[in-house]
């Protein structure tokens, strides 16, 4: 079956395309992109003006919680949330119960994803058995089962030696090591960014230096081993400095920033809702200078990826005293509106750069299909509605958990539709019927 | 800091605490603070009568919910409540029962099902009172939440200072000790800066909260500089377990560098007041000669605590307004 998407603005930075083009799809593949393509028996889908067709967005940092924490999220609810947020693929972290440190867990996740048939799911395996930081996990087995990277996310890799070995060993398979960068002793029992607001609210602080130490360690070891090192959820300006320095020296380091870290600051701890546990995440919301540095890195190209760190938690778990609440917020369904509103409409970056951050670069770093509209690529497409007025409603999220600090926010820009392997898996009900 | 005419107008206008809860000093206006202090003067007189009881809170139920051990504060609240004729109930919950599984919200909602009017809460987590205020209809009074605030302590400190010095504006107040972990510090900083005092805070750099200067105080690790010409010296408790966090090497060394000795005290004004919120570690943050000496008002603070807490309970229950409406 052929479909011809006609008349939309197509943005595909991997192929240098930004303009009104047609996209021809046959079954689950892209046939070609070009101006005024002949219909030639294809079903024509008129893309309303103002909408943008781009390669499917890829979120390389989500927690799907299955197996073991299904009260927070399942693979099925997670991918439903993903496609509603415009993501055609997600990479899921191994800190499930049990930890994804062997093929059985990986295959279970993939089976659940195949059953759900919405977004692609790329499991990320553990660096160490049980993520305990002692013995390496069976990384070849994980790779063979379908893992695309390794990490002990939630915690940093315990020692510099283990990180070195992980980089060397995973490098053999071309897999990047993704690191939750943090010096545990410096983080201590901190629950919020160490700064004026934590001081004022009496919350134990986590300095930006705790993260930057982890970044510095990773960059040095990446240089030592020649293997690819990826900084997860970067939040501190000193971390960005270390990444830039590494890149200038030719080290294979990449990094991601979460929408909450380029949108919010630690001021949100006290206002509008004091001690709102939906402002508690790790790394924490940092001070304005850090937030501004993340924006600068997004603008100048030092930041490679926007990833959500989608971290669902049940409301019982969040409805407690601030220091008892778990870290993390959901992010899949708020990432596109926040990115369009805060990055595009603020004038900081243009659409091709945004697509690079949300699609091209994550595909390149994880070496997964997608990230471009090249002929023969999977027909994974996101149709953005950059001018759509969006009101975030926590209760309406498709994720099983509703832990977002953005409830009630009005933002400019959203998702019109999501196409995975040629199937339209999501159409925004706000767009009216017949979008695609 | 000087009091602006606008603030003065505001002060004159304030005759009631138009708020459900007392969560901290941060939320209070200078006028509201002065209202509490003025009301406490009247309440103090009640404590001097042969029959120390007024009917202001008759028929009101107050629950003292203490998740941390406390003798002074809990006793002070209980006496204040009884002098106002409230029906009171004190519950001390050790951390062990928290481990058994009931959440703070559930504990509070179960209590609330029995229709108390006020809950006085002491809890080890910063923000626990803000949290409960969103869960409960009852008035929440913060009796100390983690490292955040201890508003009635700051109010009784201010009352004690004002009683002696007749004012707060322009006084140099030096606060010395473990600043980082102290809720008393945070409440006092808010209160004293709002009422125009010149606040100096002093301790080892390891125990000074980040960006504390943004509160409008002067921070130093030089204790002599902090106490020089001070009108008030307030010592904060040094907890013995802080040595484990490598905040300082030993209690002996702490005393050597920061301990309030008579010699250091004499750098302050001749009529200096020595204050401590208790419990004291004699020979650590304060020498016994200073604690027991003529400048010490430490026991006055305790005595005034009852009057100040009576004022807070009374005003939150509706004060004059409430009686008129009834």
Image (tube, helix red, strand yellow):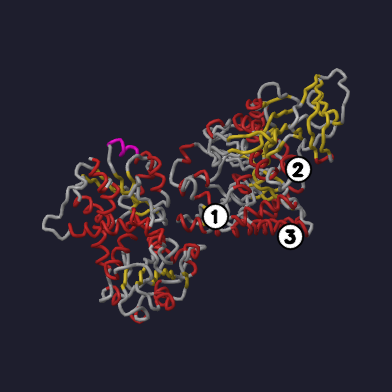
* 3 and 1 marks in contact (CB < 8 Å): no
- Residue A193 numbered mark, or none: 1
- Residue A356 numbered mark, or none: 2
In the depicted structure, whether residue A52 falls above or below residue B225: above
Tell me the chain of label 3: A
**Badge 3, how many Cα within 10 Å: few under 14, some, many 20+?**
some
Horizontal side, residue B84 vs residue B50: left or right: right
Residue A64: x, y in percent?
60, 36
Q: Quadrant of residue A214?
A: bottom right
Q: Which residues are magenta?
A: B109-114
Is residue B101 among the parts visible in the rendering? no
Q: Quadrant of the C terminus of chain B?
A: top left
Horizontal side, residue A36 vs residue A64: left or right: right
In the depicted structure, whether residue A16 falls above or below residue B22: above
* Residue sitting farthest toward the left: B50
- Provide the residue designation for mark 3: A245
Q: Which is nearer the N-term, disc 3 or disc 1?
A: 1
């Amino acid at each position: 079956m052929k479909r011809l998407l006609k008349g939309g603005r197509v943005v595909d930075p991997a192929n240098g395309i930004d303009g009104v083009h047609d996209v021809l799809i046959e079954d689950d593949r892209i046939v070609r992109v070009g101006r005024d393509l002949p219909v030639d028996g294809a079903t024509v889908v008129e893309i309303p003006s103002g909408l943008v067709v781009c390669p499917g967005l890829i979120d390389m940092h989500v927690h799907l919680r299955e197996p073991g924490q299904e009260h927070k999220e399942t693979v099925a609810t997670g991918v439903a949330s993903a496609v509603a947020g415009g993501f055609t693929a997600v990479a899921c972290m191994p800190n499930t119960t049990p930890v994804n440190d062997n093929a059985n867990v990986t295959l279970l996740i993939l089976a659940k994803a195949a059953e759900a048939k919405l977004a692609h799911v790329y499991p990320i395996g553990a660096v160490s058995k049980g993520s305990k930081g002692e013995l390496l996990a069976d990384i070849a087995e994980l790779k063979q089962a379908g893992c695309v990277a390794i990490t002990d996310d939630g915690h940093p890799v315990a020692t510099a030696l283990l990180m070195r070995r992980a980089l060397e060993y995973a490098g053999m398979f071309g897999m990047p090591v993704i690191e939750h960068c943090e010096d545990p002793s410096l983080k201590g029992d901190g629950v919020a960014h160490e700064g004026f607001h934590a001081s004022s609210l009496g919350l134990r602080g986590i300095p930006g230096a705790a993260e930057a130490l982890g970044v510095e360690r990773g960059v040095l070891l990446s240089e030592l081993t020649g293997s690819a090192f990826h900084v997860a959820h970067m939040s501190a300006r000193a971390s960005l400095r270390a990444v830039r320095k590494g890149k200038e020296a030719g080290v294979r380091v990449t990094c991601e920033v979460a929408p909450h870290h380029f949108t919010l600051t630690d001021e949100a701890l006290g206002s509008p809702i004091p001690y709102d546990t939906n402002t508690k995440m790790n790394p924490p919301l940092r001070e304005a200078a850090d937030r501004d540095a993340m924006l600068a890195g997004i603008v100048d190209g030092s930041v490679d990826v926007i990833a959500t760190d989608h971290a669902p938690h049940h409301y019982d778990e969040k409805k407690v005293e601030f220091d008892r609440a778990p870290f993390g917020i959901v992010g899949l369904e708020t990432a596109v509106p926040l990115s369009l509103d805060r990055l595009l409409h603020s004038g900081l970056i243009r659409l091709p750069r945004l697509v690079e951050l949300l699609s091209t670069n994550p595909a390149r770093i994880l070496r997964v299909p997608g990230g471009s509209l090249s002929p023969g690529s999977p027909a994974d497409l996101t149709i953005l509605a950059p001018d759509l007025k969006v009101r975030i409603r926590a209760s309406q999220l498709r994720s099983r958990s509703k832990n977002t600090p953005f409830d009630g926010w009005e933002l400019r820009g959203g998702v019109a539709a999501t196409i995975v392997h040629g199937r339209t898996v999501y159409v925004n009900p706000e767009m009216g019927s017949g979008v695609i | 800091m000087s009091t602006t005419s606008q603030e003065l107008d505001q002060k004159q206008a304030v005759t009631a605490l138009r708020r459900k809860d007392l969560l901290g000093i941060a939320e209070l206006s200078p006028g509201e603070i002065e209202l509490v202090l003025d009301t406490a003067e009247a309440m103090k007189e009640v404590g001097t009568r042969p029959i120390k009881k007024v009917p202001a809170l008759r028929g009101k139920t107050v629950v003292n919910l203490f998740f941390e051990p406390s003798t002074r504060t809990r006793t002070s609240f209980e006496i204040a409540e009884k002098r106002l004729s409230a029906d009171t109930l004190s519950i001390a919950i050790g951390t062990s029962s928290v481990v058994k599984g009931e959440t703070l919200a559930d504990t509070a909602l179960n209590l609330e099902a029995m229709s108390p009017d006020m809950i006085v809460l002491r809890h080890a987590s910063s923000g626990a009172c803000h949290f409960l205020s969103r869960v409960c209809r009852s008035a929440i009074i913060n009796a100390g939440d983690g490292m955040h605030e201890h508003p009635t302590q700051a109010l009784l400190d201010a009352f004690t200072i004002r009683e002696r010095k007749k004012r707060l504006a322009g006084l140099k107040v030096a606060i010395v000790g473990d600043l980082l972990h102290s809720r008393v510090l945070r409440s006092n900083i808010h209160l004293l800066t709002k009422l125009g005092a010149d606040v100096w805070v002093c301790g080892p750099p390891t125990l000074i909260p980040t960006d504390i200067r943004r509160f409008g105080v002067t921070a130093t690790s030089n204790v002599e500089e902090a106490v020089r010409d001070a009108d008030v010296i307030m010592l904060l408790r040094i907890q013995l377990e802080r040595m484990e966090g490598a905040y300082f090497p030993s209690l002996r060394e702490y005393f050597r560098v920061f301990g309030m000795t008579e010699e250091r005290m004499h750098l302050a004004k001749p009529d200096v007041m020595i204050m401590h919120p208790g419990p004291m570690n004699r020979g650590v943050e304060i020498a016994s000669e200073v604690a027991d000496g003529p400048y010490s008002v430490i026991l006055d603070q305790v005595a005034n605590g009852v009057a100040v807490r009576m004022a807070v309970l009374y005003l939150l229950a509706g004060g004059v307004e409430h009686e008129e409406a009834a």
